[in-house]
Image: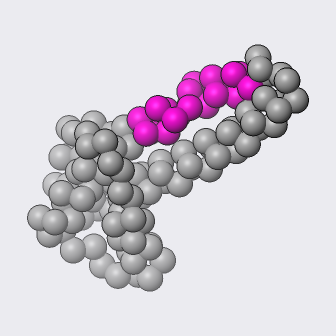
Amino acid sequence: MDNEIAWSPIRTLARRIFSQGEPLALTEETKALLRRTASEVGLSEADAQTALASEEGALSLLRDSSQRIHEGARRLTSALHRMYERQHAGDLDGARKEMQEVLTVEVVPHYRAIA
């Protein structure tokens, strides 16, 4: 996995497909984007390859990847906010617990590293 995470392209693709109703064109470039993003959000290469064998599978992969990015960001942001509040209040154990709770459910490696 590359150290630099750039999720703008996958977010743009998801918006075009799911919000604007464009059809998914399974070009080599789109497949590469979906494969790379799947890896970045904690999905196995085997699962990504299987999904990319059909348009329905690719749409599911796009949906799952987008959800993991969105939900993970929301979960981490909320936990960080609570952690900083606890930290400022002097509750370091509580602050630590906020990050530990995120780590129990978070699957996106980038968000896990931040937590």
Q: Residue at x 30, y 78 (%)?
A: 23
Q: Residue at x 85, y 24 (%)?
A: 90
Residue 81, horizontal then vertical, whole percent = 73, 42
**Quadrant position of the C terminus in the picture:** top right
Lateral position of residue 38 relative to residue 20, left or right = left
**Numbered range of the magenta stretch:** 95-115
Q: Residue at x 35, y 70 (%)?
A: 13
Quadrant of the rendered image containing residue 110: top left
Magenta stretch, main secondary structure class: helix
Residue 73 magenta-highlighted: no
Number of labels in the image equals 0
**Quadrant position of the N terminus in the picture:** top left
Up/down of 99 relative to 21, above or below: above
Lateral position of residue 28 relative to residue 94, left or right = left
Q: Residue at x 35, y 81 (%)?
A: 22
Residue 92, horizontal then vertical, whole percent = 77, 20
Visible residue check, residue 47: no
Which is nearer the eye, 14 or 9?
9
Up/down of 71 relative to 89, above or below: below
Visible residue check, residue 37: yes
Lateral position of residue 31 relative to residue 64, left or right = left
Which is nearer the eye, 74 or 61?
74
Residue 114 magenta-highlighted: yes
Up/down of 94 relative to 55, above or below: above
